[in-house]
Amino acid sequence: MERPRHQGMAKNTYMRWRLPLVCLLWEVAMIVLFGVFVRFGPEADAHWEEEKQKMNVTSDIENDFYFRYPSFQDVHVMIFVGFGFLMAFLKRYGFGSIGFNFLLAAFGIQWALLMQGWFHSFKNGKILIGVENLINADFCVGSVCIAFGAILGKTSPIQILVMTLFQVTLFSVNEYILLNLLHVKDAGGSMTIHTFGAYFGLTVTRILYRPNLEQSKDKQGSVYHSDLFAMIGTLYLWLYWPSFNSAISEHGDAQHRAAINTYCSLAACVLTTVAFSSMLQKKGKLDMVHIQNATLAGGVAVGTSAEMMLTPYGSLIVGFISGIVSTVGYVYLTPFLESRLHIQDTCGIHNLHAIPGLIGGIVGAITAAAATEDVYGKEGIIKAFDFTGPYQTRTPSVQGGFQAAGIVVSVLMALAGGALVGAILKLPVWGDPAAENCFEDDVYWEVRRTPPRAEPLRRAAGSRPAAG
Amino acid sequence: MERPRHQGMAKNTYMRWRLPLVCLLWEVAMIVLFGVFVRFGPEADAHWEEEKQKMNVTSDIENDFYFRYPSFQDVHVMIFVGFGFLMAFLKRYGFGSIGFNFLLAAFGIQWALLMQGWFHSFKNGKILIGVENLINADFCVGSVCIAFGAILGKTSPIQILVMTLFQVTLFSVNEYILLNLLHVKDAGGSMTIHTFGAYFGLTVTRILYRPNLEQSKDKQGSVYHSDLFAMIGTLYLWLYWPSFNSAISEHGDAQHRAAINTYCSLAACVLTTVAFSSMLQKKGKLDMVHIQNATLAGGVAVGTSAEMMLTPYGSLIVGFISGIVSTVGYVYLTPFLESRLHIQDTCGIHNLHAIPGLIGGIVGAITAAAATEDVYGKEGIIKAFDFTGPYQTRTPSVQGGFQAAGIVVSVLMALAGGALVGAILKLPVWGDPAAENCFEDDVYWEVRRTPPRAEPLRRAAGSRPAAG
Amino acid sequence: MERPRHQGMAKNTYMRWRLPLVCLLWEVAMIVLFGVFVRFGPEADAHWEEEKQKMNVTSDIENDFYFRYPSFQDVHVMIFVGFGFLMAFLKRYGFGSIGFNFLLAAFGIQWALLMQGWFHSFKNGKILIGVENLINADFCVGSVCIAFGAILGKTSPIQILVMTLFQVTLFSVNEYILLNLLHVKDAGGSMTIHTFGAYFGLTVTRILYRPNLEQSKDKQGSVYHSDLFAMIGTLYLWLYWPSFNSAISEHGDAQHRAAINTYCSLAACVLTTVAFSSMLQKKGKLDMVHIQNATLAGGVAVGTSAEMMLTPYGSLIVGFISGIVSTVGYVYLTPFLESRLHIQDTCGIHNLHAIPGLIGGIVGAITAAAATEDVYGKEGIIKAFDFTGPYQTRTPSVQGGFQAAGIVVSVLMALAGGALVGAILKLPVWGDPAAENCFEDDVYWEVRRTPPRAEPLRRAAGSRPAAG
């Protein structure tokens, strides 16, 4: 039944036994591990009624569900609709963009619940989960979606699943180092999600370098309608980013502030993206690639500092800069990375996540280091940076140093992890497509292709189309 | 003005007087009935200020609006965007899928507010409504959207409205029997919404069996772009299903738990759907029909039990099974139903709603029967199953029995109701399309058809398209 | 580098220096003004911890963030996705519809935060912002999106930005007059947003009248897929309108009530739109233009009164009427306005926003005038109309008079402002397109045009397309 390998170049992309095997075995593993480890946290458990009395909680509205569930749903939409449709700009890879993103995220959130659970929610041998865990799992998977953007169209679903397995694992380790060992603040994940995810993906795609990729160059672009589909992704990412950056901040002012800062940064980012998109094109026309991507850089770049007292004008400045940097990156850096460094970055994640992520880490370090009791209030500064317990004596400037260290750790972990995973994915057993079949749904999907509305085309030839 | 009937086969699909008459008369009826019966519930009435003092409520945040409105909006999106776009996979029936779904749902929610109001919110001669009623109306209409999926493309808008009128009525009766007489729990509606809606729709489509439907077989498929539109529907249904199953659960832990269970079940379901979609196709390629539909079966199948202590791993198991069952159904059962039983099920609701709905009912019965004070806590078990008042002495195992009875009642009600409504819809007065015009927007919609970007096509012939 | 003007008719649409200059300068101005004026409000500031104790707030859930953030996100989606995609019905102007709407809204919300801040949130020389300000900024921009609908396809991005600058300014003045000087209630903005925005836009487009617009008539319509994209906009506007009309109402019953009234009005509106769409077309077929637009009129028409005790049946009546009026407007009024009054209204905002806005203002005035202590309760009526301080002695009937005055003021402000701005936009320096290039993305966007799936077309000629 296996399709013959011919011409040396064609590859065996037959998935019939490999893909089902991976999906079923891994899902069974999830069930076993969930069975052993995962239980409801106190606020989702039926004992909550008694718990409330113990904790002296008088109203159900104090359940964390009501603080975070709306933000969770926004984040959830970003991961599945936002990333999925953003990547659907490719004219012939819409199924793969949306479908494989769906697959990797559905697997990834389960594995992330376990990995992050062991590190952060482990009590008496059980992982106790609640809505905050769901958000964190989505966050972790977000970093895989980012990396997926670099290898988009050039990998098999099995490779994507293998990458997800490893990346979620390494993400969780990196996150543990940053949040628990370095005691770094990174609520919107500039470092843990964006910097880590992007450099991870860029390293993987570097190792999977395909010298003959220009064979499928004609399929690597968009058509009019696929650009509109991609705008669905862009807009939902842009709109819900305030929820993303505030989703796991402390209750009250921190969530409120994170949303406002992100809103401001994103607004400014749109203006500078438009400005540079027009300025860097000879005819002065706008490029959908920039509008679809660089407008989001402002959200990435306040990921660390959004919950801090960055202030609205500080956010505007960050958004201003990141829109410029990201657009310039798309015009000059992406071609350079591809031709000189052999980094084939399908979606340009270097410009949307890597650099803005670094900016985000740096802005976070500076904002933390510059924190004063005057600005935050005495209790406010302790709450904002969690200067309690063993960190009681940490000062803002020291915190700034640790924040900076967090950037370095994230980059190093991403490079090392990406190299490892890239090497694994290079093994010739995963069913990746031949160079001339990249960016083509036909390889892994049943594509029903009928001439688009053939009959109307004929009719229209004889009758003038009416205007609306 | 009436178009002549010719050739015996062509049908009178002229809607100009019939459709407006139905819409206007029925809407006037709604106004009159709302005028007589519907008033704001205490939490939406301007007397709330005084009510609060009486009820000793200290904060406006205790208003049910803040517990349920975010979930309501998610459910609202599912009904109108989710179902509408999911059905827009048909290459030439996008207007009808989205537009008729819009129409039936807009009428249905009004009639459902009345029907469910008489049964559940009737006090001193008035129906008092609040946000929970809006959610329940959306739920009720969801069951009509499901049934609509079976007859999609083969019916006139009047038939659809007539079906909505009857189905909402019968839904409310069935719901009353289950929730009030049998005292069954079914927060996510595995039985009341999915099982009932699906078997209702399947019976209707059986009675409306069209022997010559292969005449429009070429229009019954999708094209590349219509499959992407359908993915919008799929993803919003998938993403917001945790809100669906938790929307009307008790405040606090029950809502929290229902969301987590649904999240887990849906995640597992994606993996097994992908596995079986690949495994059941000779070339091992994935089929968008499965990805669009079977990935949602996990949400249906925990509809009854999501608010119970199903546990995360229990949810994974349910999702695991329902993804398999649903995908297998699409491959083997749908063709069988059509060829042998003459059930023409356009969207395959049998695989997405009927069987997963049954699974959901059974899982609910087992989970209820297996409930113990150990797992739920003393107060928790009373709250979870509402063992109060006349049900004070009911035990979990008895509850399980009643749950099982609820499944049987729902199926029987659906078969009887569907037969009745199918017979009514078979009357030759409703303007249904001829067999060769099924799945074609042209019949009921002004379709402006211009050759898709004719000029660029010409241009492109002379110039190489640039890649992005 | 400038493209030569030739043939007298062709225009200089070269944006390379003008557009970046405007974007960058204005964004720098925003940063400076935000730096001088904008700070976090008490509920978003890190001093909240201390503030809480002062204000005797015991729980973080009392933070306004939790009352309004979900509604804010819904409104946010309406502005960017709703308006953007609704306008994407044009077959060759999808980039401009979505992209320019994105641009104007991103700039507009910043300027609105300042303008509205100076009028409403100015304390000790600073504008203190919170989530309610974000909603109000989105509202203000909504009125610009409406006006944009009238000039859609006929203006350059610079003209759009200039209009935004002025319209946001005038909106804020008008809003101040209505809300503060006349003490008018208008939570959903029938007057301030819809009436003002629509008459403003209609005046602008009247002054920019293009006698030769029929040169691009063939591009002014939709194609099948662009109509489906537009339905994304329609549905999100329709679904989230209850959030729009309730977003800034008082906590508690007012928000709850506003959502219910809007839900009811919108549902009724769909039925009458469908009825009249069919009735007014010779063949009785439905027109997507009506379904996309007139179904939303019910939301506009309860904008003022939704938070009042309009009652569910009152809302149905308002929705009933506005669906009819709006659809009739599309059929008869739009052609009349264009041919006789030279008002070229691309999206038909006269039918969707202007007339329903007027209806909304009138219904609001009547509902206010008819308010009684019996219906609202003694405290309820004071809370609902804010009859406190200097307005302690105002009676409902006097309030009704002021409401009516608010309509007149809004129309006059819109006409005067629109005339001024239209005159400014008529200056020949903004780079607007020639008549034959209207409704065409090519002018301002890099459009990659490849024949839509050329290869599959060829393949399909030789093989029968399979049906799904």
Image: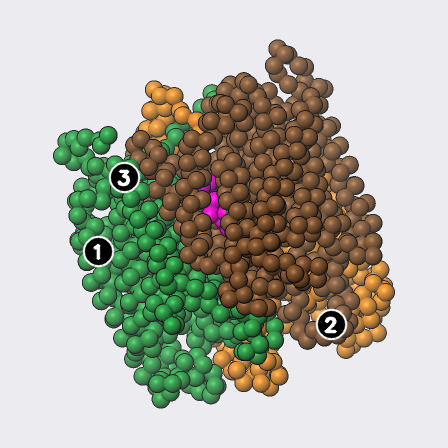
Chain colours: A green, B brown, C orange
Q: Quadrant of residue C177?
A: bottom right
Q: Main secondary structure of the magenta part?
A: helix
What's the residue at 53%, 80% (across, down)?
C48
Give the magenta part as a residue range: B293-302
What's the residue at 19%, 30% (across, down)?
A4
Q: Position of residue C245 (x, y in %)?
A: 66, 58
Instruction: Provide the residue designation for mark 1.
Output: A421
Q: Position of residue A426 (x, y in %)?
A: 18, 49
- Disc 2 crowd rating (10 Å Cα; few below 14, some 14-19, many 20+) is few
Instruction: Provide the residue designation for mark 2.
Output: B55
Q: Nearer the viewer, residue C462 or A363?
A: C462
Judging from the image, mark 2 belongs to the subunit labelled B
The residue type indicated by label 3 comes to Trp
Q: Nearer the viewer, residue B74 or B320?
A: B320
Please check whether the numbered discs 2 and 3 fall on a single chain: no
Instruction: Provide the residue designation for mark 3.
Output: A17
